[in-house]
């Protein structure tokens, strides 16, 4: 089993290409290196989520009147931690590689993460 690793793209300045680089590196590693990739969109603007997932999926995910979304977002993952529950739920519904043309799994961001 290959070693697990993490990459984080961070810069305080906007517009420097963090989202583009993160999504393209994730896609490259999935396609060329045949790695299972999970992209966690921690940006409250959710641009990586919107870039990778189809428009219909993101519209459904963020529509307030649509009821419960079909997948979890970073907000649902973080809320128990804010309530003092440090246990990890291993059954989150995320967007799998079959759901997008990047061939990666995505834990979608949520605009309300900035308010947590």
Image (tube, helix red, strand yellow):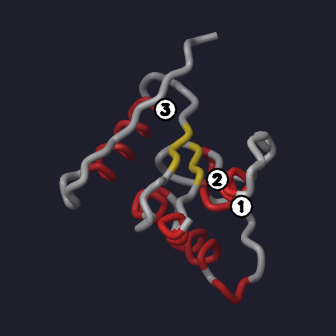
Say whether disc 3 or disc 1 marks the residue closer to the N-terminus: 3
Inter-mark Cα distance, 1 to 2: 7 Å
Q: How many labels does the image show?
A: 3
Q: How far apart are marks 2 and 3 (CA)?
A: 15 Å
The picture quadrant where one finds residue 61 is bottom right
Kindly check if marks 1 and 2 are in contact, taking CB atoms under 8 A apart as contact: yes
Residue 68 image offset from top left, x and y in percent: 77, 74
Q: Horizontally, is 82 left or right of 8 in the view? A: right
Instruction: Determine the secondary structure under disc 3.
Output: helix
Q: Which residue is drawn at 36% across and 37% down?
A: 25
Percent x, y of residue 74: 60, 56
Compared to residue 101, the image places residue 2 above or below, namely above
Reply above or below: 109 against 11: below
Q: Upstream in the sequence, badge 2 or badge 3? A: 3
- Nearer-the-camera pick, 79 or 44: 79
Q: In which quarter of the image is the N terminus?
A: top right
Front label number (3 vs 1):
1
N-term mark: 1 or 2: 1
In three-dimensional space, the C-alpha distance between marks 3 and 1, rounded to whole angstroms, equals 21 Å
Tell me the tag on residue 30.
3
At a point 79% along the width and 44% down the height, the residue shown is 89
Horizontal side of 16 relative to 24 (left or right) equals left
Q: Position of residue 50 (x, y in %)?
A: 46, 65
Identified at 54% across, 53% down, the residue is 100
Q: Name the residue under label 1.
A: 71
Q: In this view, does 23 lie above or below 70?
A: above
Q: Residue at x 53, y 64 (%)?
A: 113
- Mark 2 lies on residue: 95
Neighbor class of circle 1 (other Cα within 10 Å; few <14, some 14-19, many 20+) is: some
Q: Where is residue 115 in the image (x, y as percent from the top left)?
A: 52, 70
């Amino acid at each position: 089993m290959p070693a697990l690793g993490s990459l984080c793209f961070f810069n305080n300045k906007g517009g420097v290409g963090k989202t583009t680089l993160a999504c393209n590196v994730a896609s490259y590693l999935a396609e060329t290196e045949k790695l299972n990739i999970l992209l966690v969109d921690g940006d409250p603007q959710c641009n990586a989520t919107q870039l990778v997932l189809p428009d219909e999926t993101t519209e459904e995910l963020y529509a307030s009147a649509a009821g419960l979304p079909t997948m979890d977002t970073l907000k649902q993952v973080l809320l128990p931690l804010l309530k003092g529950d440090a246990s990890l739920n291993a059954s989150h519904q995320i967007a799998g590689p079959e759901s997008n043309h990047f061939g990666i799994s995505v834990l979608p961001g949520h605009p309300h993460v900035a308010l947590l």
